[in-house]
Amino acid sequence: MLVDSHCHLDFPDFDAERDEIIARAGEAGVRLMVTISTRVARFDTIRALAERYDNVFCSVGTHPHNAGEEAEMAVTTDDLVRLSAHEKVVAIGEAGLDYFYDKAPREAQAAGLRRHIAAARQTGLPLVIHSRDADDDMAAILREETEKGAFPALLHCFSSGRDLALTGIELGLYVSFSGIVTFKRSDELRAIAAELPANRLLVETDAPYLAPQPWRGKRNEPAYVAHTNKVLAETKGLSEAEMARQTTANFFRLFSRVPRHLEQEG
């Protein structure tokens, strides 16, 4: 059994064949998917999609690209906590810092991240963290916020430096790898993955983006997480089955609201 811990099934890229894509995931052994919120303003759409499919769960939150919109809407930690009460919501986010595109003021990104951290701390749901070209500021915020009280969290689609990965592990976070780890020039990223403890690793697609090497440049989909698992297994010196068991066990440990019986059924 495999889990795609991060995809965006609500995106229009999938409108024409969403049922088929979810079916293909199952055929590839991907039994569960978490479709990740990028805008609280679209949460109703995300929630409805998760309600439609038994094997799809969701998060609630706002991507750093949209942090300015969230500020204008005056979204509060209490709002995130209230919306997360739905049984299909299994995570907070994604939220974080993106200094590569800088689509929102950095102050708004940081404020949004701290609101999401507070919601994760209050609910016990894992925070899905987006971090790009912001390693130092991200590490500083994570350390500051952990001192206020621990919270479950995941550095998603990891492509940052070794120091941030080790800081995350030190603070009790998990690290998720996407198709980027399969790219030919990702030797440094694979070296980081090899160093991290296997019991803190997850796999994801971030679909429709970042398809793994055989499909690079094409639309990604949850079924392809099987190839990311294969490369991660090779990196860690494990069999594909061992890696799948480990990442799935890690998923259920972190995403604790997902019913555990689904792990056995998978």
Image (tube, rainbow, N blue to C red):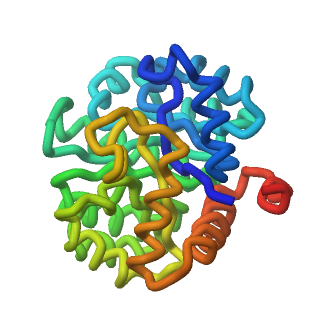
Q: Is residue 74 above or below residue 93?
A: above
Front-most of residues 135 and 107: 135
Compared with residue 230, is residue 93 higher up or lower down, i.e. above or below?
A: above
Given residues 186 and 156, the one toward you in this image is 186
> Which of the 4 image quadrants contains residue 156?
bottom left
Question: Which of the 4 image quarters holds residue 247?
Answer: bottom right
Answer yes or no: is residue 19 visible: yes
Determine the residue located farthest toward the top in the rendered image: 16
* In the image: residue 196, left or right of residue 183: right
Q: Residue at x 16, y 54 (%)?
A: 133
Residue 205 position, x and y percent, is 44, 47
- Residue displayed at 67% across by 34% down: 23
Q: Residue at x 42, y 77 (%)?
A: 234
Q: Position of residue 204 (x, y in %)?
A: 48, 52
Report if residue 123 is visible in the image.
Answer: no
7 vs 50: above or below: below
Q: Position of residue 132 (x, y in %)?
A: 22, 51
User: Which picture quadrant has residue 171?
Assistant: bottom left
Identify the residue at horizontal 33%, vertical 47% (top origin). Answer: 96
Q: Extreme front residue here?
A: 214
Quadrant occupied by the C terminus = bottom right
Query: Compared with residue 68, is residue 126 higher up or lower down, i.e. above or below?
Result: below
Q: Which one is nearer the viewer's eye here, 5 or 42?
A: 5
- On-image quarter of the N terminus: bottom right
